[in-house]
Image (cartoon, rainbow, N blue to C red):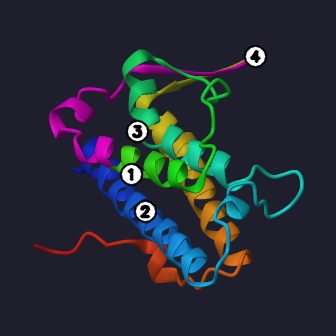
Amino acid sequence: MISLYDAVVPTWRQILGGAKQFLQRGADHCADNNIDPADLVQARLFPDMFPLNLQVVLVHAHSIGAVEACRTGSFSPPRNTPPPADYAGCQKMIADALAGVEALQPDDVNALAGRDVQFVAGELKLPFITEGYLFSFAMPNFYFHATTAYDILRMKGVPLGKRDFMGTPTLKK
């Protein structure tokens, strides 16, 4: 049987590592091509989608923030979390999420199994247990926002490939 830790933490670590890498590639692209990285921070794929800096906030919220939600029993969209104002802030937020995920201990994550977790957005309240919250809400949102951040950089001309997104897979030891 696979543990809760094994089902989520290696995936978060892999994709956050990829996000750290593709954001660095974005910074390098800007430096190499005399582009102001501030131009990327507010870039969007489409006018009604969040910009890069909010995509980064949501990657953080649906990874290490999801663990906190399981601990406290509640998750609300991070409306009160100020988005990074600059590109370096986006990089730091991803690095902080990765460091937080890397610090998670298996017993601590596994102890969250079966707990009640409620999604709260204004009047909307959705009841979950930890597993349902992580697998049907947090993880799909995590992938969506990480992919969208990657796609914004691709759209802005950063030379990225799938391997940049994928990070380092978990290989047989």
Q: Amino acid at mark 1?
A: Ala
Answer whether labels 1 and 3 touch (C-beta < 8 Å). no
For disc 3, the neighbor class at 10 Å (few under 14, some 14 to 19, many from 20) is many
Real-space CA distance between mark 2 and mark 4, rounded to the nearest whole angstrom: 32 Å
Answer whether labels 4 and 3 touch (C-beta < 8 Å). no
Q: Quadrant of residue 118?
A: top right
For disc 2, the neighbor class at 10 Å (few under 14, some 14 to 19, many from 20) is many
Which residue is label 2 attached to? 20
Tell me the element at label 2. Answer: helix
Answer whether labels 1 and 2 touch (C-beta < 8 Å). yes
Of the image marks 1 and 4, the number of the one nearer the N terminus: 1
Q: Amino acid at mark 3?
A: Ile
Of the image marks 1 and 2, the number of the one nearer the N terminus: 2
Can you tell which mark lies on residue 95?
1
Answer whether labels 2 and 3 touch (C-beta < 8 Å). no
Q: Which residues are magenta?
A: 99-123
Which residue is label 3 attached to? 64
Tell me the element at label 4. Answer: loop
Residue in the foreground of this view, choosing between 24 and 145: 24
Q: Amino acid at mark 4?
A: Gly
Can you tell which mark lies on residue 19?
none
The residue under the point 38% across, 44% down is: 96
Of the image marks 2 and 4, the number of the one nearer the N terminus: 2
Residue in the foreground of this view, choosing between 89 and 140: 89
The residue under the point 44% across, 43% down is: 63
Q: Quadrant of residue 110?
A: top left
Of marks 1 and 4, the one in the foreground: 1
Of the image marks 1 and 3, the number of the one nearer the N terminus: 3
